[in-house]
Image (spheres, grey):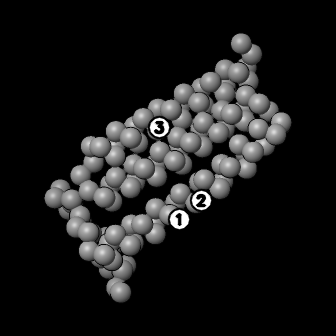
Amino acid sequence: MNNMEALSTIFICIGILFNLFGCIGLIRLPDVYNRLQAATKCVTLGCCSILLGVFFHFGFTDAGIKALVAIPLLFFGATVAAHALVKGAYLFGIKLGEGTIKDDYKDAVKS
């Protein structure tokens, strides 16, 4: 096993772990806002790490370049979508979890 194969295996394993923890967070976290954060971490850190591992495995071939191009698209698309979903849920009136101490979003959204 050469260095690039080892590096790709490490990144793919890290991505799988982030996806696993994100899925556990979707089940265990108390409200929609925390669950959405777990889902966003799944996509940004998990899938982007897997794609980076795919790039290291295939190198500058068609598959590697496509994986490299998909990383910023996934990263920015997921964060913008998560922000829009949180704002929509908040404006719709979805309550925060029982253990929430402070609502920082209350003053930012006035519509």
For numbered disc 2, what is the local secondary structure?
Answer: helix
- Earlier along the polypeptide chain: callout 2 or callout 3? 3
Mark 1 → mark 2, Cα distance in angstroms = 6 Å
Residue 6 percent location from the top left of the image: 67, 20
* Label of residue 31 in the image: none
Name the quadrant containing residue 1.
top right
Q: Which amino acid type is marked by label 1?
A: Val
Q: Residue at x 46, y 69 (%)?
A: 84
Name the quadrant containing residue 34.
bottom left
For numbered disc 1, what is the local secondary structure?
Answer: helix
According to the picture, the residue beneath numbered tag 1 turns out to be: 80
Residue 39 percent location from the top left of the image: 42, 50
Image position of 55 with respect to 86: above or below:
above
Q: On the rendered structure, is 60 left or right of 103?
A: right
Q: Residue at x 38, y 73 (%)?
A: 88
* Label of residue 18 in the image: 3
Q: Which amino acid type is marked by label 3?
A: Phe
Q: Which amino acid type is marked by label 2?
A: Phe
Residue 40 percent location from the top left of the image: 46, 52
Q: Residue at x 21, y 59 (%)?
A: 97
Mark 1 → mark 3, Cα distance in angstroms = 20 Å
Circles 1 and 2, Cβ within 8 Å, touching? The answer is yes
Image position of 93 with respect to 50: above or below:
below
Q: Most extreme residue toward the right, as rendered?
A: 61
According to the picture, the residue beneath numbered tag 2 turns out to be: 76
Circles 2 and 3, Cβ within 8 Å, touching? The answer is no
- Earlier along the polypeptide chain: callout 1 or callout 3? 3
Mark 2 → mark 3, Cα distance in angstroms = 18 Å
For numbered disc 3, what is the local secondary structure?
Answer: helix
Q: Quadrant of the C terminus?
A: bottom left
